[in-house]
Structure formats: C-alpha cells, structure tokens
Image (tube, grey):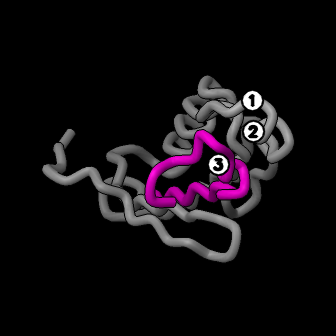
Amino acid sequence: MTHQADFSVPIERVGRYLHFRWNFVAPVPVEDARQRLQDYFTRLGYALASSGDALVMKRGTLARSMLKWSPRNLAVELTARCAPAGDGTAVTLELRLNHKSIDTPARWNGI
C-alpha cells in the first residue's frame, strides 16, 4: 500500500450541506472494493440506503444531531462509486453532511 503525504479532503459548501470528496485507487477488484467499503461503514454505524450503481449509506438524523450533539449523531450520507482502473478499482467517496446538524452552540469553528 502506498502512503500519501497529504490526507486533506476538499470541502465544498452546497446550500445546507457540506460535501467531502476523496478519490483513490484500491488494489482489489470492483466487487471486493464495494463489499469492503460496505462492511467498513456498516461497522461505523452506517445503514445501507441503496446499492445500485453507487453504494449509498446513511448515519444519524438531523433531529437527533440537534438534540444530542456528537459526531456519530450528525446527519450524514455517504456515496461510494467504484470503477475498474488498471490493476484495481478507482473509488470516489462523497460524504454529505447537513451543516444544520452542527449549527448548535457546540458548532465547529469555521463552518
């Protein structure tokens, strides 16, 4: 596995959402990459919402995140797209965070 020197993830504000996008190539076949992503995010508390062309998983709700603020309660939707790429799989992860869920007295600085 190769290591990157910079792990920063671009953040884009779109309406009431914050979008985090990350692209990488996994050295495994597409179906293995999809299954590993699904297993990993399930362990983190995400629930499968759709598994068509893209794997869509969700965690938390807006109401819950406003009542009990913690990162695990934030309303988040994750979309993973996998495509063949050379000797592996090109993966695009997009995390969509409803920033209203962090618009509380304990809000994050700068958001």
Disc 1 to disc 3, C-alpha distance: 11 Å
Check whether the beta carbons of the residues at disc 3 and disc 2 lie within 8 A of each other.
yes
Residue that appears at 73% across and 46% down: 75
Check whether the beta carbons of the residues at disc 2 and disc 1 lie within 8 A of each other.
yes
Disc 3 to disc 2, C-alpha distance: 7 Å
Residue 38, by quadrant, is: top right
Query: Label 3, on which residue?
Result: 102
Image quarter in which the N terminus is found: top left
Pick whichever of labels 3 and 2 is earlier in the sequence: 2
Seen as rendered, the residue at the extreme top is: 43
Query: Label 2, on which residue?
Result: 65
Seen as rendered, the residue at the extreme left is: 5
Measuring from the top left, give residue 109's x and y in whole percent: 45, 52
The 10 Å Cα crowd at callout 1, few under 14, some 14 to 19, many 20 or more, is: few
**Of residues 20 and 43, the one drawn nearer to the viewer in this rendering:** 20
Of the residues shown, which amino acid type is indicated by label 2? Ser
The reply, left or right, for residue 97 in relation to residue 27 is: right
Magenta part of the chain: 91-111
